[in-house]
């Protein structure tokens, strides 16, 4: 099987030749892996929209392109920068690398939920990269069109986290109107991506924390679920074969049935210190594909090679049978992660993740 066939089989609840792989890296860790393989000398495509050589070299089965607010992360090397929404971002140095975070919220004071401009996502030039991926790799890889930070995260990037949390309880009419206004960009961008031929449309808003949800399930159902339902149905109406994926960190076990009810196919990243992958499989495995699930808080950065192999084997044994698994670390691999741990991950999946699964004792 090639990567696309492998992924589509897994998404349809079939067992492909092996478990599909998908890995995300911070810029610093990507450089580290590129240096390890001598990426500049490997002869991979070197065009403006080409996939990272590391992903091709190690056999990433998914190729992802991002449109919208999530593209504002790492958008500039400047200490402070502003994106097209007017959100102010800053670089935070944590010793081994940097991350970027929103710090200035341009809509903090608005009282009319329609009193702001949304960037133009109908411009075809925004989608040159996805058209390139579909044309050049669409026959061999599963192409993912990402519009993460879709509603909730974008809302507080623009307005402030504390302000939006207050809006849920003290400014309900405003918030319903505000979310419906923000929905417009996602409808436009997602439609463009689906029409371009992506296999997976990938949305996301972190609504889970380490142990519980940031907002209670009933609040989620009142404010966010109807907006997501419209997005999911719109994209599936455009192409019934497209799969809908959603990213949320943390413990969201209480609302997984809600996501499934409105048409979710894939949940990412299944953060294992918050959401037990075996439990998720047992409860929802006949309907839900899990994407991620390898611990990125301890195992990948701080565990031994043997611990990495043991965790991969646990997923192969408890989650992989029957398909519906795309295996990878449960978010961007951090720069303090040993290269040896990444090699152990890739090698174990490729050697022991072949169907039928038979995990060594």
Image (cartoon, rainbow, N blue to C red):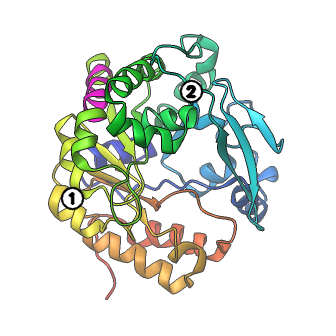
Q: Is residue 165 above or below residue 130?
A: below
Q: Is residue 2 magenta?
A: no
Mark number, residue 109: 2
Label 1: how many Cα within 10 Å (few below 14, some 14–19, many 20+): some
Image point (68%, 31%), residue name: 49
Q: Nearer the viewer, residue 111 or 347?
A: 111
Side (left or right) of 162 relative to 26: left
Front-most of residues 255 and 292? 255
| Residue 157 seen from this side | yes
Q: Secondary structure at mark 2?
A: loop
Outermost residue toward the front in this view:
170
Tell me which residue sits at (79%, 61%) in the image.
Answer: 35
Q: Which residues are magenta?
A: 224-234
Numbered disc in front, either 1 or 2: 2
Disc 2 residue crowd, few under 14, some 14–19, many 20+, Cα 10 Å = few
Q: Earlier in the sequence, mark 1 or mark 2?
A: 2
Labelled disc at residue 169: none
Residue 111 shown left or right of residue 226 in the figure: right
The C terminus: image quadrant: bottom left
Contact between marks 1 and 2 (CB within 8 A): the answer is no
Residue 335, percent across and down? 69, 65
Tell me which secondary structure the magenta stretch mostly adopts: helix
Residue 233 within the magenta-colored segment of the rendering: yes
Q: Residue at x 43, y 17 (%)?
A: 184
On screen, 94 above or below 217?
Answer: below
Residue 148 seen anywhere in this rendered image of the structure: no
Determine which residue is flagged by label 1.
Answer: 322
Q: Residue furthest bottom?
A: 361
Give the quarter of the image for residue 263. top left
């Amino acid at each position: 099987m090639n990567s696309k066939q492998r992924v589509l089989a897994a998404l349809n609840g079939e067992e492909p030749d092996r478990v599909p792989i998908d890995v995300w890296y911070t810029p610093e860790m990507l450089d580290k892996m590129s240096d390890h393989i001598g990426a500049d000398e490997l002869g991979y495509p070197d065009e403006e929209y080409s996939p990272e050589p590391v992903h091709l070299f190690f056999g990433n089965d998914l190729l992802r392109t991002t449109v919208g607010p999530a593209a504002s992360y790492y958008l500039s090397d400047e200490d402070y920068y502003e994106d097209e929404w007017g959100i102010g971002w800053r670089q935070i140095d944590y010793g081994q690398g940097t991350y970027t975070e929103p710090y200035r919220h341009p809509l903090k004071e608005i009282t009319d939920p329609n009193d702001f401009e949304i960037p133009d996502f109908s411009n075809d030039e925004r989608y040159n990269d996805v058209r390139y991926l579909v044309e050049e790799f669409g026959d061999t890889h599963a192409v993912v069109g990402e519009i993460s930070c879709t509603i909730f995260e974008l809302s507080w990037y623009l307005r402030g986290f504390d302000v939006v949390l207050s809006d849920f309880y003290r400014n309900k009419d405003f918030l319903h109107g505000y979310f419906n206004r923000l929905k417009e960009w996602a409808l436009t961008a997602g439609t463009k991506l689906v029409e371009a031929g992506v296999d997976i449309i990938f949305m996301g808003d972190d609504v889970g924390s380490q142990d519980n949800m940031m907002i209670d399930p009933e609040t989620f159902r009142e404010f966010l679920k109807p907006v997501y339902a419209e997005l999911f149905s719109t994209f599936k109406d455009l192409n019934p074969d497209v799969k809908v994926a959603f990213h949320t960190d943390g413990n969201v076990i209480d609302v997984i049935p809600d996501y499934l009810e409105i048409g979710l196919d894939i949940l990412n990243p299944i953060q294992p210190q918050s959401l037990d992958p075996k439990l998720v499989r047992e409860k929802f495995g006949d309907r839900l594909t899990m994407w991620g699930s390898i611990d990125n808080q301890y195992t990948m950065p701080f565990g031994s090679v043997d611990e990495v192999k043991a965790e991969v084997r646990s997923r192969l044994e408890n989650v992989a049978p029957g398909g519906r698994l795309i295996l990878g670390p449960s978010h961007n691999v951090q720069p303090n992660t040993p290269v040896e741990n990444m090699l152990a991950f890739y090698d174990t999946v490729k050697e022991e993740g072949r169907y039928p699964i038979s995990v060594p004792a």
